[in-house]
Image (cartoon, rainbow, N blue to C red):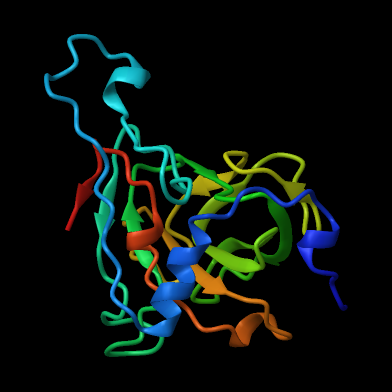
Amino acid sequence: MTHASPRSRLTTRSASWFVAVVVVVAGASIVHARPGTIDQPAEVNSRAERIFVTGEGLTFPIDPLPRCEVLNNYGGRSKTFGAGGHQGVDIGADFRQEVYAVEDGFLYREFSDLSSPAGLGWGLWSVTDVKYRYYHLDGFAEGLAEGDEVVAGQLIGYVGDTGNASPGGWHLHFEVRPGPHPQFGSAPTVDPVPLLDIPSICNVY
């Protein structure tokens, strides 16, 4: 099946962050934007006070509560591809924390083979011609199917340990694949961490 670019399907949003992706692909250095910090600890359990992001960068792909552990492991060891073969970033979380679309676009691929390395997951093709992959989900958001349009911040699934994730090792494997490219699987990956607007309550390792 041939898909038209999402640019023809949705109104293109501002994509200033995508310049950073192009810089990474070109091999130039990139400054890691650090999320702002809260000077004083919050005195209440308000989400607004516990989560602080800069508003710059890519929408974070999961709800950071109650747990958010960003493993800066792009290019590390992969169970599938071996040393140097890890093509995304792993974000540790609790079972069934919410997973979100990071940009407007459409779900071009549903991963549903529980015996595959990915387990349950989505491929998202954005209006900026970037493809994102979400692996190891426990389940999908109700009503969503391959081909559906989504918007940034929309719930698309829940963190799990399907595929080749360790049992009980709940996390989201998240990949960024800049395009456009004629074949979904052959687009090269880039490190997601410098591109994400990481909430200040997340631990980054």
The answer to whether 161 appears left or right of 46 in the picture is right
Vertical relation: 71 (above or below) 199: below
Quadrant assignment for the C terminus: bottom left
Seen from the viewer's position, the closer of residues 169 and 105 is 105
Quadrant assignment for the N terminus: bottom right
Residue 112: quadrant of the picture: bottom right
Seen from the viewer's position, the closer of residues 158 and 4 is 4
The answer to whether 63 appears left or right of 9 in the picture is left
Picture mark count: 0
Vertical relation: 48 (above or below) 124: above
- In the current view of this chain or complex, which residue is farthest to the top? 44
- In the current view of this chain or complex, which residue is farthest to the left? 40
Residue 57 screen position, x and y as percent: 43, 50
Residue found at x 57% / y 39%: 153
Residue 94 screen position, x and y as percent: 35, 42
Seen from the viewer's position, the closer of residues 205 and 53 is 53
The answer to whether 56 appears left or right of 157 in the picture is left
Residue found at x 39% / y 64%: 192
Residue 189 screen position, x and y as percent: 47, 78
Residue found at x 46% / y 41%: 96
Vertical relation: 74 (above or below) 7: below
Residue 138 screen position, x and y as percent: 52, 51
Determine if residue 98 is in view. Answer: yes
Residue 114: quadrant of the picture: bottom right
Determine if residue 167 is in view. Answer: no
Vertical relation: 58 (above or below) 135: above
Residue 43: quadrant of the picture: top left
